């Protein structure tokens, strides 16, 4: 089975799970895999593990990944154990960012709130990437200010939500905001390409 198909098979389980109304979008999950493959991501920190849709979809196809995350909601903490099953032992769960030890992560996913967002500056690798799921404008602005040399792109989908999705079918499949905190050449080229794609996709969406 192709990697993307396998991710989708896992993701669909979360679409049908209890508490599915806050899961990450399908587009975001697939784009995160693109980032993992493109930049050789080895360890991930996810702020807001929720019911585990991102971790549960990505872990089965990325055996090498070290995965940590934060969650403090009781319902989600229980759902994580149930939904991740065997994969649960691969995820290090902390209640909030202040409890995460001072190790460096290649990719930090922001899909929840945390009062200590500034700590991300100490937790991201030199050429690390921050990916924001959903709008989260205040967090996006704060994070971009922390990294003066950053490059930012909002990658968007041109497909509408599928019938199995918990989100309205008439709406676009979502997006992912990507911040390269200190981009190297490879990342700058990727970023530029993605910026062009985003412009074209907005044009396409307008015409639809
Ligand atoms: C957008 S959700 C995180 C979703 C997660 N990344 C996923 O894809 O499954 C953000 C926060 O909302 C809270 N949350 C998510 N689902 C919830 C639910 N069904 N009931 C109550 N709180 C929920 C959790 O605290 C979570 O960290």
Image (cartoon, rainbow, N blue to C red):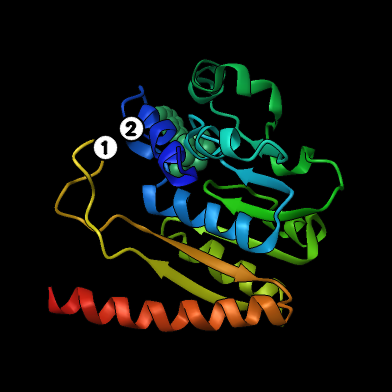
Hey, which quadrant is residue 36 in on the image?
bottom right
As drawn, the label of residue 60 is: none
Percent across and percent down for residue 108 are 66, 53
Q: Image point 28% across, 78% down: which residue?
A: 202
Q: How many marks?
A: 2
| Neighbourhood count class around disc 2 (C-alpha, 10 Å): few under 14, some 14–19, many 20 upward | many
As drawn, is 64 to the left or to the right of 192?
Answer: right
Percent across and percent down for residue 103 are 85, 48
Secondary element at image label 2: helix
Q: Image point 54% across, 27% down: which residue?
A: 73
Q: Looking at the image, is 135 positioned above or below residue 202?
A: above
Q: Give whichever of discs 2 and 1 has the lower sequence position.
A: 2
Instruction: Name the image quarter holding the C terminus.
Output: bottom left
| Neighbourhood count class around disc 1 (C-alpha, 10 Å): few under 14, some 14–19, many 20 upward | some
Q: Image point 65% across, 71% down: which residue?
A: 180
Distance from mark 2 CB to nearest ligand 1 atom below 8 Å: no
Kindly report the distance in space between the C-alpha atoms of the residues bearing marks 2 and 1: 6 Å
As drawn, the label of residue 15 is: 2
Percent across and percent down for residue 16 are 31, 26
Tell which of 116 and 167 is nearer to you.
Answer: 167
Secondary element at image label 1: loop
Badges 2 and 1: C-beta atoms under 8 Å apart? Answer: yes
Q: Say which residue label 1 marks.
A: 166
Hey, which quadrant is residue 64 in on the image?
top right
Give the residue at the far front of this rendering: 1
Q: Looking at the image, is 53 positioned above or below residue 82?
A: below
Percent across and percent down for residue 52 are 51, 32
Q: Looking at the image, is 192 positioned above or below residue 105?
A: below
Q: Looking at the image, is 147 positioned above or below residue 44?
A: below
Q: Image point 70% across, 51% down: which residue?
A: 116
Instruction: Name the image quarter holding the N terminus.
Output: top left
Distance from mark 1 CB to nearest ligand 1 atom below 8 Å: no
């Amino acid at each position: 089975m192709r990697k993307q198909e396998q991710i989708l098979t896992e993701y669909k389980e979360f679409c049908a799970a209890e508490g599915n109304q806050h899961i990450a979008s399908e587009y975001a999950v697939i784009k995160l895999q693109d980032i993992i493959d493109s930049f050789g991501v080895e360890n991930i920190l996810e702020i807001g593990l929720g019911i585990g849709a991102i971790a549960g979809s990505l872990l089965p196809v990325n055996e090498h990944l070290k995965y940590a995350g934060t969650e403090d909601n009781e319902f989600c903490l229980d759902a994580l154990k149930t939904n991740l099953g065997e994969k649960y032992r691969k995820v290090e769960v902390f209640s909030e960012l202040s409890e995460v030890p001072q190790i460096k992560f290649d990719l930090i996913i922001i899909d929840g709130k945390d009062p200590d967002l500034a700590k991300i500056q100490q937790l991201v690798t030199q050429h690390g990437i921050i990916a924001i799921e959903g709008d989260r404008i205040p967090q996006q602005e704060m994070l971009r200010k922390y990294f003066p040399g950053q490059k930012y792109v909002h990658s968007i989908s041109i497909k509408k939500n599928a019938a199995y999705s918990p989100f309205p079918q008439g709406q676009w499949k979502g997006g992912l905001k990507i911040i390269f905190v200190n981009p190297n050449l490879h990342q700058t080229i990727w970023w530029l390409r993605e910026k062009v794609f985003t412009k074209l996709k907005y044009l396409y969406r307008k015409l639809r």
